[in-house]
Image: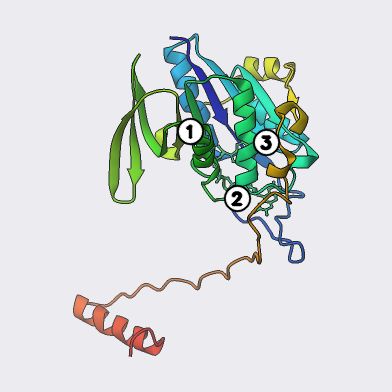
Amino acid sequence: MALKIIVCAKQVPDTNEVKIDPVKNTLIREGVPSILNHDDANALEEALKIKDQYPDTHITVVTMGPPQAKDLLIECLAMGADEGILVSDRALGGSDTWATSNALTAAVKKIGKFDILFAGRQAIDGDTAQVGPQIAEKLGFPQVTYVKEFSMNEKNITVKRALEDGYEVIQLQMPCVLTTIKELNTPRYMTIGGIYDAVKRDIPTWGARELEIDLNTVGLDASPTNVFRSFTPAPKGKGMMLECDCEKDTAKVLLEKLVEKHVIS
Ligand SMILES: Cc1cc2nc3c(=O)[nH]c(=O)nc-3n(C[C@H](O)[C@H](O)[C@H](O)COP(=O)(O)OP(=O)(O)OC[C@H]3O[C@@H](n4cnc5c(N)ncnc54)[C@H](O)[C@@H]3O)c2cc1C
């Protein structure tokens, strides 16, 4: 089987504790190293596992971001992807999730027919988990989110979808969109040979013109989301261990503490 797989991957700051500019209400990215978003590494790994099974499979990784997001594509190529495409243009700056998925959907359409599109469940910076499902909706293809197990044969794909209290087993046909979580697999490392080859590769950059996208659907002005306020939540107080001789005493002390803190009266 010669499958065509697209992986959407985002370059994100390497921290969960990014600082926020109090005036602009945007993330301060300066000085913070960038990495391949964790869930997207799982997305690529699953695509690579399919390629291990069906070697004629072709994997295209697409990322939208500033010019330095090219480094992410080099990393993906060094892991084993066949092609990387950078979607980058000033006209796309300030896009919210709706505008981002418009640009990525246009890029996916330009790449052409595919069998599976993988995206991560969630980006660790924006954290909305909206972009993958939005792309699926805009393409009109079936989607399954939170994929934690994947298997396929010539006809069907079978996935386990994680739920809070269990899982669903879903069978679907290609083409489809799947969003992945970390339980799905362990991403492989880049190989030395892969890095050597990847840095020499030509990575095309597509801007608004190449995407032939309506400029009223991308960028800050086209973004329906408004961020009114961003803030860093105050750190939670330290936890407290109640150690008494018996459960009855523990319950009594717990009760007193809750009354003292006005949690109960
Ligand atoms: C008003 C507004 C203005 C914004 N301005 C900016 C800005 O100027 N610069 C900026 O960097 N961000 C900006 N953002 C944030 C930006 O909209 C989100 O980072 C972006 O839409 C992705 O959303 P997310 O991070 O929540 O991703 P999620 O929806 O959580 O991501 C899910 C998955 O979708 C895929 N995906 C998401 N984003 C990309 C991408 N860029 N390329 C490839 N795959 C992707 C990945 O597979 C990812 O795992 C802005 C947001 C708002 C609301």
Q: Is mark 3 within 8 Å of ligand 1?
A: yes
- Horizontal and vertical percent for residue 91? 78, 41
- Horizontal and vertical percent for residue 16? 59, 53
User: Quick one: quadrant of the C terminus?
Assistant: bottom left
Of mark 2 and mark 3, the one earlier in the sequence is 3
Q: Left or right: 260 with respect to 72?
A: left
Q: Tell me the amino acid under the disc marked 1.
A: Gly
- Horizontal and vertical percent for residue 1? 43, 9
Disc 3: which residue: 64
Disc 2: which residue: 126
* Residue sitting at x 35%, y 84%: 258
Disc 1: which residue: 140
* Residue sitting at x 54%, y 19%: 113
As helix, strand or loop, the secondary structure at mark 2 comes to: loop
Q: Left or right: 39 with respect to 171?
A: right
* Residue sitting at x 19%, y 80%: 248
As helix, strand or loop, the secondary structure at mark 3 comes to: strand
Q: Is mark 2 within 8 Å of ligand 1?
A: yes
Q: How is the image coloured?
A: rainbow
